[in-house]
Amino acid sequence: MSDRRNFIKQMIAGGVLLPSVTQSLFGKTDYTPKPGGYMEESEIRIALIGKGGMGTGDANCALRTPNVKITAVCDLYDARLEQAKNQWGNVFTTKDYREILERKDVDAVIVATPDHWHQPISIAAMKAGKHVYCEKPVIHKVKEARALIDAQKAAGSYFQAGSQGMASLGNRKARQLVLAGFLGKINLIDGQFTAAPGILGNYPVPGDASEKTIWWKQFIGSAPKHDFDAQRFFYWRNWKDYGTGIAGDLFVHVLASLHYITDAIGPEKVYTTGGIRHYTDGCRDTPDVMLGYLDYPDRHNTGAFTVQLGANYVDGVSKKWGSMNFRIIGSEGSLDVEWDKVTFKSVKEIDMDELKKLDEIGQGIDVPEKISPKEVVFKAADGYKGGHYDHFLNFFTGIRNKTPLTADVLFGVRSAIPALLCYESYLSGKAIRWDPENN
Protein backbone atom coordinates (compact mmCIF):
# COMPACT_ATOMS: atom_id res chain seq x y z
CA MET A 1 0.00 0.00 0.00
CA SER A 2 2.84 2.38 0.80
CA ASP A 3 4.28 1.81 -2.70
CA ARG A 4 0.92 2.83 -4.17
CA ARG A 5 0.86 6.05 -2.12
CA ASN A 6 4.41 6.87 -3.16
CA PHE A 7 3.44 6.37 -6.81
CA ILE A 8 0.53 8.82 -6.47
CA LYS A 9 2.77 11.38 -4.77
CA GLN A 10 5.29 11.07 -7.60
CA MET A 11 2.54 11.67 -10.15
CA ILE A 12 1.53 14.81 -8.29
CA ALA A 13 5.09 16.08 -8.15
CA GLY A 14 5.40 15.48 -11.87
CA GLY A 15 2.23 17.39 -12.65
CA VAL A 16 0.32 14.37 -13.93
CA LEU A 17 -2.79 15.23 -11.90
CA LEU A 18 -4.66 18.48 -12.39
CA PRO A 19 -2.67 21.31 -10.79
CA SER A 20 -5.73 22.64 -9.00
CA VAL A 21 -6.12 19.37 -7.13
CA THR A 22 -2.60 18.94 -5.82
CA GLN A 23 -3.10 21.18 -2.84
CA SER A 24 -6.12 19.23 -1.64
CA LEU A 25 -5.18 15.60 -2.12
CA PHE A 26 -2.72 14.63 0.58
CA GLY A 27 -2.41 17.86 2.53
CA LYS A 28 -5.02 19.47 4.73
CA THR A 29 -8.10 20.20 2.65
CA ASP A 30 -10.14 22.28 5.07
CA TYR A 31 -10.87 25.44 3.08
CA THR A 32 -11.33 27.55 6.22
CA PRO A 33 -9.36 30.82 6.00
CA LYS A 34 -6.56 31.37 8.49
CA PRO A 35 -7.37 33.91 11.23
CA GLY A 36 -6.05 37.38 10.56
CA GLY A 37 -5.15 36.63 6.96
CA TYR A 38 -6.01 38.53 3.82
CA MET A 39 -9.05 36.32 3.31
CA GLU A 40 -10.98 37.64 6.29
CA GLU A 41 -10.10 41.25 5.55
CA SER A 42 -11.27 41.23 1.94
CA GLU A 43 -15.01 41.62 1.38
CA ILE A 44 -16.41 39.97 -1.73
CA ARG A 45 -19.57 41.49 -3.18
CA ILE A 46 -21.82 39.05 -4.99
CA ALA A 47 -24.85 39.29 -7.24
CA LEU A 48 -27.41 36.57 -7.85
CA ILE A 49 -28.70 35.99 -11.38
CA GLY A 50 -31.67 33.66 -11.15
CA LYS A 51 -33.51 33.70 -7.81
CA GLY A 52 -35.27 30.35 -7.96
CA GLY A 53 -34.96 27.74 -5.24
CA MET A 54 -31.37 26.76 -6.08
CA GLY A 55 -30.22 30.32 -6.62
CA THR A 56 -31.69 31.43 -3.30
CA GLY A 57 -30.03 28.51 -1.55
CA ASP A 58 -26.72 29.31 -3.21
CA ALA A 59 -26.86 32.95 -2.17
CA ASN A 60 -27.78 32.15 1.43
CA CYS A 61 -24.95 29.63 1.65
CA ALA A 62 -22.47 32.10 0.15
CA LEU A 63 -23.52 34.67 2.74
CA ARG A 64 -22.71 32.24 5.56
CA THR A 65 -19.03 32.38 4.60
CA PRO A 66 -16.84 35.17 6.05
CA ASN A 67 -17.02 38.67 4.57
CA VAL A 68 -19.40 38.11 1.69
CA LYS A 69 -22.09 40.69 0.90
CA ILE A 70 -24.92 40.54 -1.64
CA THR A 71 -25.45 43.78 -3.53
CA ALA A 72 -27.67 42.91 -6.50
CA VAL A 73 -30.26 40.38 -7.70
CA CYS A 74 -31.63 39.62 -11.15
CA ASP A 75 -34.73 37.57 -11.89
CA LEU A 76 -37.39 37.61 -14.58
CA TYR A 77 -40.31 37.36 -12.14
CA ASP A 78 -41.43 40.44 -10.19
CA ALA A 79 -42.34 38.57 -7.01
CA ARG A 80 -38.85 37.13 -6.66
CA LEU A 81 -37.32 40.59 -6.85
CA GLU A 82 -39.62 41.70 -4.05
CA GLN A 83 -38.61 38.64 -2.06
CA ALA A 84 -34.95 39.56 -2.57
CA LYS A 85 -35.48 42.97 -0.98
CA ASN A 86 -37.36 41.39 1.93
CA GLN A 87 -34.64 38.79 2.46
CA TRP A 88 -31.48 40.77 1.88
CA GLY A 89 -32.42 44.40 2.43
CA ASN A 90 -31.08 47.21 0.31
CA VAL A 91 -30.06 45.31 -2.82
CA PHE A 92 -30.29 46.50 -6.41
CA THR A 93 -32.86 44.48 -8.37
CA THR A 94 -33.43 44.13 -12.10
CA LYS A 95 -34.86 41.80 -14.72
CA ASP A 96 -31.92 42.43 -17.06
CA TYR A 97 -28.71 40.60 -16.12
CA ARG A 98 -26.69 43.06 -18.21
CA GLU A 99 -27.42 45.76 -15.64
CA ILE A 100 -25.82 43.52 -13.00
CA LEU A 101 -22.66 43.15 -15.08
CA GLU A 102 -22.31 46.92 -15.46
CA ARG A 103 -22.23 47.51 -11.71
CA LYS A 104 -18.97 48.41 -9.94
CA ASP A 105 -20.20 46.97 -6.62
CA VAL A 106 -20.28 43.39 -7.95
CA ASP A 107 -17.13 41.26 -7.77
CA ALA A 108 -18.68 37.87 -8.51
CA VAL A 109 -21.97 36.53 -9.81
CA ILE A 110 -23.91 33.37 -9.05
CA VAL A 111 -25.52 32.11 -12.26
CA ALA A 112 -28.53 30.02 -11.25
CA THR A 113 -30.71 30.38 -14.33
CA PRO A 114 -32.20 27.65 -16.52
CA ASP A 115 -29.43 25.63 -18.18
CA HIS A 116 -29.71 27.23 -21.63
CA TRP A 117 -28.65 30.57 -20.12
CA HIS A 118 -25.65 29.25 -18.13
CA GLN A 119 -23.02 29.59 -20.84
CA PRO A 120 -23.99 32.94 -22.41
CA ILE A 121 -24.42 34.73 -19.07
CA SER A 122 -21.19 33.25 -17.71
CA ILE A 123 -19.26 34.39 -20.78
CA ALA A 124 -20.77 37.89 -20.58
CA ALA A 125 -19.94 38.08 -16.87
CA MET A 126 -16.30 37.10 -17.37
CA LYS A 127 -15.94 39.58 -20.22
CA ALA A 128 -17.25 42.21 -17.80
CA GLY A 129 -14.50 41.33 -15.32
CA LYS A 130 -16.65 39.34 -12.88
CA HIS A 131 -15.84 36.04 -11.22
CA VAL A 132 -18.46 33.36 -11.82
CA TYR A 133 -20.06 30.63 -9.75
CA CYS A 134 -22.23 28.78 -12.29
CA GLU A 135 -24.76 26.12 -11.39
CA LYS A 136 -24.39 22.74 -13.02
CA PRO A 137 -24.34 21.77 -15.81
CA VAL A 138 -22.25 24.73 -16.93
CA ILE A 139 -23.29 24.18 -20.55
CA HIS A 140 -26.56 23.12 -22.16
CA LYS A 141 -25.06 21.74 -25.37
CA VAL A 142 -21.69 20.03 -25.90
CA LYS A 143 -20.87 22.55 -28.64
CA GLU A 144 -20.95 25.37 -26.05
CA ALA A 145 -17.91 24.05 -24.18
CA ARG A 146 -15.04 25.56 -26.15
CA ALA A 147 -16.37 29.12 -26.06
CA LEU A 148 -16.82 28.95 -22.28
CA ILE A 149 -13.29 27.65 -21.72
CA ASP A 150 -11.82 30.25 -24.07
CA ALA A 151 -13.73 33.06 -22.35
CA GLN A 152 -12.38 32.10 -18.95
CA LYS A 153 -8.85 31.86 -20.29
CA ALA A 154 -9.10 35.26 -21.95
CA ALA A 155 -10.64 36.99 -18.95
CA GLY A 156 -8.62 35.31 -16.22
CA SER A 157 -11.71 35.28 -14.02
CA TYR A 158 -12.28 32.65 -11.38
CA PHE A 159 -14.97 30.21 -12.52
CA GLN A 160 -16.46 27.62 -10.19
CA ALA A 161 -18.86 24.90 -11.35
CA GLY A 162 -21.72 24.47 -8.90
CA SER A 163 -21.55 20.74 -8.15
CA GLN A 164 -21.34 21.19 -4.41
CA GLY A 165 -21.01 17.60 -3.25
CA MET A 166 -17.55 17.11 -4.70
CA ALA A 167 -16.14 19.61 -2.18
CA SER A 168 -17.52 17.69 0.81
CA LEU A 169 -15.43 15.93 3.41
CA GLY A 170 -16.87 12.62 2.25
CA ASN A 171 -15.73 13.15 -1.32
CA ARG A 172 -12.30 14.28 -0.15
CA LYS A 173 -11.81 11.20 2.05
CA ALA A 174 -13.06 8.95 -0.76
CA ARG A 175 -10.55 10.49 -3.19
CA GLN A 176 -7.75 9.87 -0.73
CA LEU A 177 -8.71 6.24 -0.20
CA VAL A 178 -9.20 5.50 -3.91
CA LEU A 179 -5.98 7.10 -5.12
CA ALA A 180 -4.01 5.50 -2.29
CA GLY A 181 -5.13 2.10 -3.57
CA PHE A 182 -7.27 0.86 -0.68
CA LEU A 183 -9.99 -0.37 -3.06
CA GLY A 184 -7.61 -1.98 -5.53
CA LYS A 185 -8.66 -1.37 -9.14
CA ILE A 186 -12.01 0.41 -9.49
CA ASN A 187 -14.53 -1.42 -11.69
CA LEU A 188 -18.00 -0.01 -10.95
CA ILE A 189 -19.60 3.18 -9.59
CA ASP A 190 -23.31 3.19 -8.83
CA GLY A 191 -25.56 6.18 -8.16
CA GLN A 192 -29.36 6.07 -7.97
CA PHE A 193 -32.06 8.72 -7.46
CA THR A 194 -35.69 8.12 -6.53
CA ALA A 195 -38.69 10.30 -5.80
CA ALA A 196 -42.31 9.57 -4.98
CA PRO A 197 -44.78 10.22 -7.81
CA GLY A 198 -46.85 13.39 -7.72
CA ILE A 199 -50.43 13.97 -8.73
CA LEU A 200 -50.94 14.15 -12.47
CA GLY A 201 -51.97 17.48 -13.93
CA ASN A 202 -50.43 20.94 -13.98
CA TYR A 203 -47.99 21.74 -11.21
CA PRO A 204 -48.88 24.66 -8.93
CA VAL A 205 -47.85 28.13 -10.10
CA PRO A 206 -48.28 31.51 -8.39
CA GLY A 207 -51.62 33.18 -9.01
CA ASP A 208 -50.02 36.34 -10.41
CA ALA A 209 -47.88 34.53 -12.99
CA SER A 210 -48.41 36.21 -16.35
CA GLU A 211 -46.56 38.06 -19.08
CA LYS A 212 -47.07 41.21 -17.02
CA THR A 213 -45.04 39.83 -14.11
CA ILE A 214 -42.62 37.57 -16.02
CA TRP A 215 -40.27 38.64 -18.83
CA TRP A 216 -41.15 35.67 -21.01
CA LYS A 217 -39.22 36.66 -24.13
CA GLN A 218 -36.00 36.95 -22.12
CA PHE A 219 -36.63 33.56 -20.52
CA ILE A 220 -36.88 31.97 -23.96
CA GLY A 221 -33.60 33.51 -25.13
CA SER A 222 -31.96 31.22 -27.69
CA ALA A 223 -34.50 28.41 -27.13
CA PRO A 224 -37.24 27.71 -29.67
CA LYS A 225 -40.06 30.27 -29.60
CA HIS A 226 -43.07 29.32 -27.51
CA ASP A 227 -46.18 31.09 -26.26
CA PHE A 228 -46.23 32.04 -22.59
CA ASP A 229 -46.53 28.97 -20.38
CA ALA A 230 -46.06 29.34 -16.63
CA GLN A 231 -45.38 25.61 -16.37
CA ARG A 232 -42.32 25.99 -18.56
CA PHE A 233 -41.08 28.98 -16.59
CA PHE A 234 -41.42 27.53 -13.09
CA TYR A 235 -40.69 23.88 -14.00
CA TRP A 236 -38.16 24.43 -16.77
CA ARG A 237 -36.15 21.34 -15.78
CA ASN A 238 -38.93 19.21 -17.27
CA TRP A 239 -38.33 20.61 -20.75
CA LYS A 240 -35.48 19.84 -23.15
CA ASP A 241 -35.52 23.40 -24.55
CA TYR A 242 -34.15 24.75 -21.26
CA GLY A 243 -32.45 21.77 -19.59
CA THR A 244 -31.93 18.04 -20.01
CA GLY A 245 -34.13 16.77 -17.21
CA ILE A 246 -32.68 13.96 -15.13
CA ALA A 247 -29.32 13.91 -16.93
CA GLY A 248 -28.33 17.52 -16.35
CA ASP A 249 -30.16 17.90 -13.06
CA LEU A 250 -29.14 14.71 -11.25
CA PHE A 251 -26.61 12.56 -13.12
CA VAL A 252 -24.14 15.45 -13.30
CA HIS A 253 -23.79 15.50 -9.50
CA VAL A 254 -22.44 11.95 -9.34
CA LEU A 255 -20.31 12.55 -12.42
CA ALA A 256 -18.63 15.58 -10.83
CA SER A 257 -17.95 13.65 -7.63
CA LEU A 258 -16.54 10.60 -9.38
CA HIS A 259 -14.36 12.75 -11.63
CA TYR A 260 -12.90 14.39 -8.53
CA ILE A 261 -12.49 11.15 -6.59
CA THR A 262 -10.92 9.09 -9.39
CA ASP A 263 -9.26 11.92 -11.33
CA ALA A 264 -11.26 10.88 -14.41
CA ILE A 265 -11.94 13.34 -17.23
CA GLY A 266 -14.68 11.56 -19.15
CA PRO A 267 -16.10 8.29 -20.50
CA GLU A 268 -15.28 6.52 -23.75
CA LYS A 269 -18.83 5.27 -24.30
CA VAL A 270 -22.26 6.34 -23.07
CA TYR A 271 -25.59 4.57 -23.40
CA THR A 272 -28.84 5.75 -21.85
CA THR A 273 -32.42 4.53 -21.97
CA GLY A 274 -35.69 5.41 -20.28
CA GLY A 275 -38.87 7.31 -20.98
CA ILE A 276 -41.92 9.13 -19.65
CA ARG A 277 -43.61 6.31 -17.75
CA HIS A 278 -45.91 8.15 -15.35
CA TYR A 279 -46.08 11.88 -16.11
CA THR A 280 -47.85 11.42 -19.44
CA ASP A 281 -50.07 14.48 -18.96
CA GLY A 282 -48.07 16.81 -21.24
CA CYS A 283 -46.27 18.64 -18.40
CA ARG A 284 -42.83 17.42 -19.43
CA ASP A 285 -40.94 16.17 -22.47
CA THR A 286 -37.94 14.71 -20.62
CA PRO A 287 -37.95 11.24 -18.98
CA ASP A 288 -39.24 10.49 -15.52
CA VAL A 289 -37.31 7.20 -15.59
CA MET A 290 -33.76 7.15 -16.93
CA LEU A 291 -30.89 4.64 -16.79
CA GLY A 292 -27.40 5.58 -17.91
CA TYR A 293 -24.26 3.49 -18.43
CA LEU A 294 -20.85 5.08 -18.98
CA ASP A 295 -17.54 3.29 -19.62
CA TYR A 296 -14.43 5.06 -18.30
CA PRO A 297 -10.85 4.20 -19.29
CA ASP A 298 -8.03 3.56 -16.82
CA ARG A 299 -6.04 6.81 -16.65
CA HIS A 300 -3.68 6.48 -13.67
CA ASN A 301 -3.65 2.73 -13.01
CA THR A 302 -6.72 3.04 -10.78
CA GLY A 303 -8.79 0.78 -13.04
CA ALA A 304 -11.17 1.05 -15.97
CA PHE A 305 -14.73 1.22 -14.66
CA THR A 306 -18.37 1.41 -15.62
CA VAL A 307 -20.73 3.95 -14.09
CA GLN A 308 -24.37 3.04 -13.74
CA LEU A 309 -26.73 5.91 -13.00
CA GLY A 310 -30.46 5.63 -12.55
CA ALA A 311 -33.32 7.92 -11.67
CA ASN A 312 -36.96 7.10 -11.10
CA TYR A 313 -39.38 9.90 -10.28
CA VAL A 314 -42.08 7.28 -9.70
CA ASP A 315 -40.43 5.35 -6.87
CA GLY A 316 -41.57 6.39 -3.42
CA VAL A 317 -40.13 3.34 -1.70
CA SER A 318 -36.39 3.14 -2.35
CA LYS A 319 -35.53 6.62 -1.02
CA LYS A 320 -32.13 6.94 -2.70
CA TRP A 321 -30.38 10.18 -3.58
CA GLY A 322 -27.20 9.48 -5.47
CA SER A 323 -25.56 12.88 -5.25
CA MET A 324 -25.33 12.45 -1.48
CA ASN A 325 -24.91 8.67 -1.32
CA PHE A 326 -23.29 6.58 -4.05
CA ARG A 327 -21.07 3.49 -4.14
CA ILE A 328 -17.60 2.87 -5.56
CA ILE A 329 -16.57 -0.78 -6.02
CA GLY A 330 -13.04 -2.03 -6.52
CA SER A 331 -11.28 -5.37 -6.63
CA GLU A 332 -10.34 -5.12 -2.94
CA GLY A 333 -13.29 -3.31 -1.41
CA SER A 334 -16.04 -0.72 -1.71
CA LEU A 335 -16.89 2.79 -0.51
CA ASP A 336 -20.32 4.19 0.29
CA VAL A 337 -19.75 7.90 -0.14
CA GLU A 338 -21.86 10.54 1.61
CA TRP A 339 -21.15 14.23 2.15
CA ASP A 340 -20.27 13.75 5.82
CA LYS A 341 -19.49 10.03 6.00
CA VAL A 342 -17.61 7.32 4.11
CA THR A 343 -18.04 3.59 4.77
CA PHE A 344 -15.13 1.40 3.67
CA LYS A 345 -15.71 -2.34 3.32
CA SER A 346 -12.76 -4.57 2.44
CA VAL A 347 -12.51 -8.13 1.15
CA LYS A 348 -9.78 -8.73 3.73
CA GLU A 349 -9.08 -7.54 7.25
CA ILE A 350 -8.36 -3.82 7.24
CA ASP A 351 -4.95 -2.66 8.43
CA MET A 352 -5.89 0.23 10.73
CA ASP A 353 -2.28 1.38 10.92
CA GLU A 354 -2.22 1.90 7.15
CA LEU A 355 -5.34 4.07 7.37
CA LYS A 356 -3.78 6.17 10.10
CA LYS A 357 -0.75 6.90 7.90
CA LEU A 358 -2.87 8.91 5.47
CA ASP A 359 -2.32 12.65 5.67
CA GLU A 360 -4.85 14.58 7.69
CA ILE A 361 -7.86 16.20 6.04
CA GLY A 362 -9.43 17.52 9.23
CA GLN A 363 -12.84 18.09 10.81
CA GLY A 364 -13.05 14.55 12.16
CA ILE A 365 -13.14 12.70 8.83
CA ASP A 366 -9.70 11.12 9.39
CA VAL A 367 -10.61 9.02 12.43
CA PRO A 368 -11.71 5.51 11.37
CA GLU A 369 -14.41 3.86 13.47
CA LYS A 370 -14.00 0.10 13.33
CA ILE A 371 -17.33 -1.64 12.72
CA SER A 372 -15.81 -5.07 12.07
CA PRO A 373 -12.41 -6.42 10.96
CA LYS A 374 -13.46 -5.71 7.35
CA GLU A 375 -15.47 -2.49 7.75
CA VAL A 376 -14.65 1.01 8.98
CA VAL A 377 -16.55 4.29 8.92
CA PHE A 378 -15.16 7.82 8.65
CA LYS A 379 -17.47 10.57 9.93
CA ALA A 380 -17.26 14.34 9.94
CA ALA A 381 -17.25 16.00 13.33
CA ASP A 382 -20.46 17.41 14.78
CA GLY A 383 -21.14 20.87 13.45
CA TYR A 384 -19.67 20.20 10.01
CA LYS A 385 -21.15 22.83 7.69
CA GLY A 386 -21.41 20.61 4.62
CA GLY A 387 -20.17 20.38 1.06
CA HIS A 388 -22.20 23.35 -0.14
CA TYR A 389 -20.46 25.63 2.37
CA ASP A 390 -17.04 24.14 1.59
CA HIS A 391 -17.60 24.68 -2.12
CA PHE A 392 -18.36 28.38 -1.75
CA LEU A 393 -15.51 28.87 0.68
CA ASN A 394 -13.17 27.24 -1.83
CA PHE A 395 -14.43 29.66 -4.50
CA PHE A 396 -13.96 32.77 -2.38
CA THR A 397 -10.60 31.58 -1.04
CA GLY A 398 -9.37 31.18 -4.62
CA ILE A 399 -10.46 34.70 -5.50
CA ARG A 400 -8.86 36.25 -2.43
CA ASN A 401 -5.60 34.29 -2.44
CA LYS A 402 -5.26 33.75 -6.18
CA THR A 403 -5.09 29.99 -5.66
CA PRO A 404 -6.43 27.37 -8.13
CA LEU A 405 -9.97 26.02 -7.91
CA THR A 406 -10.67 22.31 -8.01
CA ALA A 407 -14.03 22.70 -9.79
CA ASP A 408 -12.75 25.18 -12.37
CA VAL A 409 -14.14 25.75 -15.85
CA LEU A 410 -12.41 22.71 -17.35
CA PHE A 411 -13.64 20.49 -14.53
CA GLY A 412 -17.15 21.90 -14.95
CA VAL A 413 -17.19 21.23 -18.68
CA ARG A 414 -15.76 17.74 -18.30
CA SER A 415 -18.38 16.77 -15.72
CA ALA A 416 -21.20 18.33 -17.76
CA ILE A 417 -20.41 16.66 -21.08
CA PRO A 418 -21.06 13.05 -19.95
CA ALA A 419 -24.45 14.14 -18.59
CA LEU A 420 -25.29 15.82 -21.90
CA LEU A 421 -24.13 12.73 -23.78
CA CYS A 422 -26.49 10.68 -21.61
CA TYR A 423 -29.38 12.79 -22.84
CA GLU A 424 -28.21 12.68 -26.45
CA SER A 425 -27.98 8.89 -26.22
CA TYR A 426 -31.51 8.73 -24.84
CA LEU A 427 -32.81 10.85 -27.74
CA SER A 428 -31.01 8.80 -30.40
CA GLY A 429 -31.48 5.39 -28.81
CA LYS A 430 -27.83 4.65 -29.56
CA ALA A 431 -24.56 4.39 -27.67
CA ILE A 432 -22.24 7.37 -28.14
CA ARG A 433 -18.48 7.06 -28.42
CA TRP A 434 -16.39 9.87 -26.92
CA ASP A 435 -12.71 10.74 -26.77
CA PRO A 436 -12.24 12.51 -23.42
CA GLU A 437 -8.54 13.16 -24.02
CA ASN A 438 -8.93 15.01 -27.31
CA ASN A 439 -12.39 16.63 -27.14
Image (tube, helix red, strand yellow):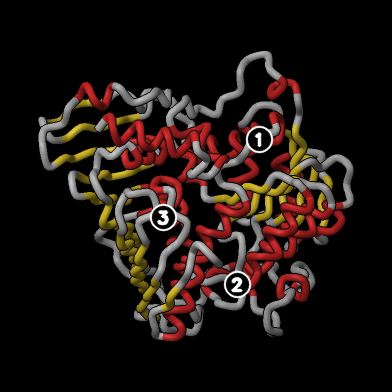
Contact between marks 1 and 2 (CB within 8 A): the answer is no
Q: Is residue 190 above or below residue 165?
A: below
Q: Which residue is mark 2?
A: 141
Secondary structure under the numbered disc 3 in the rendered image: helix
Can see residue 196? no
Q: Residue furthest top?
A: 36
Mark on residue 398? 1
Mark 1 and mark 2 lie on one chain; the one further toward the N terminus is 2
The answer to whether 75 appears left or right of 136 in the picture is: right
Q: CA distance from mark 1 to mark 2?
A: 28 Å
Q: Residue 112, position in %: x, y?
A: 64, 56
Mark 2 and mark 3 lie on one chain; the one further toward the N terminus is 2
Q: Residue 2, position in %: x, y?
A: 28, 29
Q: Residue 180, position in %: x, y?
A: 32, 36
Q: CA distance from mark 1 to mark 3?
A: 24 Å
Query: Which quadrant holds residue 292?
Result: bottom left
The answer to whether 378 appears left or right of 247 in the picture is: left
Q: Nearer the viewer, residue 63 or 141?
A: 141
Amino acid type, mark 3: Val
Secondary structure under the numbered disc 2 in the rendered image: loop
Amino acid type, mark 2: Lys
